[in-house]
Amino acid sequence: MNFQLSEEQQMLADSAKRFVRDNSDVETHRRNKKLMPLDAATWQQFADLGWLAVPFEEEHGGLGMGPLETMVLLEALGEGLIMAPYIATVVLGGGFLRQASAAQQAETIPALLEGKLQVAFAAEEYERVFTLENTAMVADLKGNEAILNGTKSCVMNGDQADLLVVLARTAGKPGDQDGLSLFLVDVNAPGVERVPHRTVDGRQGAEIRFNQVKVAEAARIGALHGGYAIARQVLHEGLLALSAESVGSLSVLLNETVEYSKTRKQFGMPIGKFQVLQFRMADMFIAMEQTRSLLLAATLKTVEGHDDAAMAVHAMKAQLGRAGRNIAQEAIQIHGGMGMTDELGVGHYVKRVTGVDGLFGNADVHLMAIARSA
Amino acid sequence: MDLRVPEQEKAFRDEVRTFLEESLTPEIREAGRLVTSVFAPVKEAMAWQRILNDKGWAAPHWPKEFGGTGWSVSQRAIFAEELVRAETPPLVPMGLHMCGPCLIGCGTEEQQQEYLPKILNGEHFWCQGYSEPGSGSDLASLKTFADKDGDDYILNGTKIWTTYAHYANKMFALVRTNRDGKPQQGITFLLLDMDLPGITIEPIVGLDEVPEQCQVFFDNVRVPQKNRVGAENDGWTVAKYLLTFERGGQEYAPGLNVMLEKIRLMAEKQQTAFGPLNKDPVWKHKFAALEADVLALEFTEMRIKSALSAGKDPGALSSMTKILGTELLQKVTELRIETLGSQSVIWQPQALVPGEEQPVIGPEYALTAMPHYLNSRACSIYGGSNEVQRGIIAKAVLGL
Ligand SMILES: Cc1cc2nc3c(=O)[nH]c(=O)nc-3n(C[C@H](O)[C@H](O)[C@H](O)COP(=O)(O)OP(=O)(O)OC[C@H]3O[C@@H](n4cnc5c(N)ncnc54)[C@H](O)[C@@H]3O)c2cc1C
Ligand SMILES: Cc1cc2nc3c(=O)[nH]c(=O)nc-3n(C[C@H](O)[C@H](O)[C@H](O)COP(=O)(O)OP(=O)(O)OC[C@H]3O[C@@H](n4cnc5c(N)ncnc54)[C@H](O)[C@@H]3O)c2cc1C
């Protein structure tokens, strides 16, 4: 067993931390009160730093790295509350494209690596508690084509994406793992309509409506009706990345709260001297460390292909939701009135970790996944 | 001991319901539905207050001779419940629930005559100037100074977190008139106009992106001494009198029951792979725990009301209901975002402004969930933080 970063991973961490020092996005968060175009300059910087290439194989021009390196990178980005749609495009989008046909890859991966292609995973649906198998949106098969009809909700990066990966049902009913298929859909395809919106964490998403959208067979990823296994693998890598990012954000919430409690004085002493607050911060610290442990457990088990890797991913996302709630709520409470303002960074971090719990199944959904499989 | 409801109270409930049905305008109802805070959209809340005042019902908790209704405690409870059930926007509390009762208890007859009618009809919009940047939980350390000059005081300093100062034309404030001795003994309670020369108001944007609170600066602001409530240096007594109203006057259970019922309906609409969410064992368990807590709170609040109607002082019990009510509200808003999943992540504050007619993205019932969750984090901070309230119970009730 070894929990040390390799030299390469350390370099990645250092470059990410440097970037964050120069680009922390709290100020941007505060200013973004409306839908903003993609920050193209930052994205280009990501490309130049090689970050877009992290999870791709060398034969595709990638760095041949995996979830561990993504974890290292994302944790640093989470500390800076960097809003770039890395998870949507590189982790989820890239994850699906790595499973795509050679022709699809040739068409997309080079552009993605250059920073010229944005991707979004259209998975969630209104009034359906998210799990992959709970997908209801239908793709009817007509000859060699699939015809998409329905609405995908809260598609992260959906407003900026050029390319959508759509999870739809080609057979079976909600609840079935079989019968799901994955399609690559150009956002400009006839019948695709996007309703962009902001999300609580200062980012952007979209409702995406599909009205008789025709998709050629060549645009399918994986086997017909066999999308579940691919989607699950990619989603789990996405959840690992989301969790790594959140661990970075949570550690900032903890540190800022502790620091604030040392300087804020009431009744003639720093509020950090009140034992009730000390104990609560000690609990925040414990929750933080437990989350970090599960992140490592889930990431290492995934990388090494352990049988219980999926369980660890569910446990991690559940822990992230619960610890995130606790740390976020205490961070506000201990900051008093200041914690409720748009002015301090705290509130922006709180909104991010709160939003993250809501995405791709909250803590309850993931605990239930563990309970049902036991 | 029994729970029977007298016939005349049932008739009273019907009377209130009929009145609400007839007098609530669509605009006021919309504002009520869009509430994400204890503070409602101002324009509609004030319109609603005027309608209630025309009926004589704006301040049921005031003594009849000052414009109250003369209702029994249980009639007041019924009225409060029906307001919540009809989803009316809550009235702005600083005048009706804070300054008003305070003037009734501690003001001169002249002050009562001058201010109380205008609190009722909304002509005066009050804000509460207590907290300062350096004086939050430790309120008594406040240092907005009021120095005597002829018949006036001259104010210098700053207040912060002043809710709705940017809408207010009046402020009741705690100021320091004596720099020596125990901090509590040098504080004076003053009433002042918000348009006085030397006052600047800076709104503070909150987590929900709405400027609800403000910082207010005083630069040599001249306030007549006759605007003092109570004796000079005795403002702490006045403030403490008022605080029991701020904390104890509120009932949380009726509103929580309404919210829980709506969450149940939302859960019915959410499909899991195994059926609707309201049949999901994990969800049901969480929901049941909250229902039990709210039922307990309902009876705790009733016990306090019955003590009140027997003329007893609920004392530190107001700290208990403040803790329970605010923390249950926080849990209920939390269950709501959990019930809605990613639908609560969609952020559209512009759709929360009454009359904007902004199309809602996603289910309409999900619109208020996240802003309300975020905003309700403030409830355990304001009005004396819940740590401070627990301190009061430990000291005053348990003798620690
Ligand atoms: C099953 C068991 C086995 C044990 N075995 C051994 C043994 O083998 N050898 C041995 O030497 N001792 C042993 N002990 C004793 C044990 O170490 C003491 O019980 C323990 O140190 C607490 O001391 P106390 O019981 O005097 O409680 P107290 O110290 O009086 O504490 C009472 C309560 O006050 C709290 N408290 C105390 N100080 C603070 C503070 N500063 N801030 C906040 N809270 C505070 C405590 O947490 C506790 O809740 C054992 C005890 C038990 C219950
Ligand atoms: C939405 C909102 C509306 C408000 N409206 C008004 C208004 O209209 N008028 C007005 O005057 N004020 C208003 N306030 C201010 C409010 O009363 C203060 O925020 C509150 O008193 C806490 O003070 P603080 O924010 O300075 O926090 P601090 O006092 O700095 O407290 C920070 C943290 O330390 C804890 N703490 C402090 N002392 C102790 C202790 N002795 N033991 C244990 N823990 C302690 C607190 O509980 C809190 O968790 C409002 C606040 C909010 C958030």
Image (tube, coloured by chain):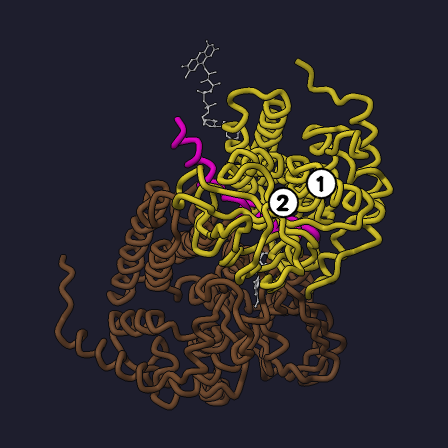
Chain colours: A yellow, B brown
Question: Residue A301, percent across and down?
Answer: 59, 22
Residue A244, given in percent of the width and then of the height, sits at 65, 36
Identify which residue is drawn at 58% across, 63% down: A191
Q: Is residue A279 visible?
A: no
Nearest to N terminus: mark 2 or mark 1: 1
Residue B181 among those drawn in magenta: no
Say if A19 sits above or below B223 in the image.
above
Q: Which residues are magenta?
A: A345-374
In the rendering, which numbered label is found on residue A103? Answer: 1
Q: Position of residue A17 (x, y in %)?
A: 80, 38
- Which chain letter goes with mark 2? A
Q: CA distance from mark 2 to mark 1?
A: 9 Å
Task: Report x, y in % for residue B390.
Answer: 46, 47
> Which residue does the image show at 74% across and 42% down from the upper left?
A77
The quadrant of the image that shows the C terminus of chain A is: top left
Badge 2 marks a residue whose secondary structure is helix
Residue type, label 2: Ala
A368 in the magenta segment: yes
Mark 2 sits near ligand 2, with its Cβ under 8 Å away: no
- Name the residue at 33% across, 41% down: B281
Q: Are marks 2 and 1 on the same chain?
A: yes
Asked if one can make out residue A270 in the rendered structure from this viewpoint, the answer is yes
Q: Are marks 2 and 1 in contact (CB under 8 Å)?
A: yes
Which amino acid, mark 1? Ala
Disc sitting over residue A343 in the figure? none
Viewer-nearest residue: A304 or B381: A304
Furthest-front residue in view? A143
Q: Circle 2 sits on which residue?
A: A218
Quadrant containing the N terminus of chain A in the rendered view: top right
